[in-house]
Image (cartoon, helix red, strand yellow):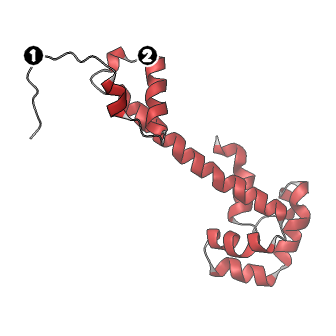
Amino acid sequence: DFRAYKEEFRLFVAPFDIDINDVPTWFQVEAIELQCSEELKAKFSSCSLFNFYKNVIVPSGQFPSLIDNALQVVSMFGSTYRCEQLFSKMKFSEKSQLRSQLTDNHLNDILFISSSVLKPDLDSLCSDRRHIVSNVPIKCKE
């Protein structure tokens, strides 16, 4: 629920526009120092948000609480993207022809395999198996 992080987002997106009384006490001193710097205000308005943090704030090391907040906000979206990918794969799996055979364990296995970077050695796995040949002809898509 992103509404719970409203203040953190505002602090990240508009550090020069926030009211000092509205920020947490742990950040007030840094916020005052940041907002008093005309040089930082000029750099903030002349470059993108990510470049401001990456090239100006982080290298200076001057605002550790602002940096921590920025890292938390940015990392939320990376992990959210990954979760959305997994839910999308899960939704696709549920719509397949075999959906009536899916159990929670099957779904868990599908998500694990689809999100893994490991490549299975299928030849080795199949060499140990005894194959059953079907008499049903295989139809290829054209």
Q: How many marks?
A: 2
Q: Quadrant of the N terminus?
A: top right
Picture coordinates of residue 22 (x, y %)?
A: 83, 57
Of residues 133 and 35, the one nearer the viewer is 133
Q: Which mark is residue 105?
A: none
**Which residue sits at x=47%, y=35%?**
87
- Of marks 1 and 2, the one in the foreground: 1
Left or right position of 133 against 8: left
Who comes first in sequence, dot 1 or dot 2?
2
Could you tell me how far apart the alpha carbons at marks 1 and 2 are, in whole angstroms? Answer: 29 Å
Q: Which mark is residue 103?
A: 2
Mark 2 neighbour class, 10 Å CA radius: few under 14, some 14 to 19, many 20 or more: few
Q: Is residue 71 above or below residue 125?
A: below
Q: Is residue 67 above or below residue 60?
A: above
Q: Quadrant of the C terminus?
A: top left
Mark 1 neighbour class, 10 Å CA radius: few under 14, some 14 to 19, many 20 or more: few
**Which residue sits at x=64%, y=49%?**
76
Left or right position of 103 against 70: left
Q: Which residue is mark 1?
A: 135
Q: Is residue 108 above or below residue 53?
A: above
Picture coordinates of residue 16 (x, y %)?
A: 76, 71
The quarter of the displayed image where residue 80 is located: top right
Q: Is residue 16 visible?
A: no
Q: Considering the numbered disc 1 on the image, is that residue within a helix, a strand or a loop?
A: loop
Q: Is residue 137 visible?
A: yes
The amino acid sitting under disc 2 is: Thr
**Which residue sits at x=9%, y=29%?**
139
**Which residue sits at x=70%, y=81%?**
43
Q: Considering the numbered disc 2 on the image, is that residue within a helix, a strand or a loop?
A: loop
The amino acid sitting under disc 1 is: Asn
Picture coordinates of residue 69 (x, y %)?
A: 76, 57
Q: Is residue 136 above or below residue 111?
A: above
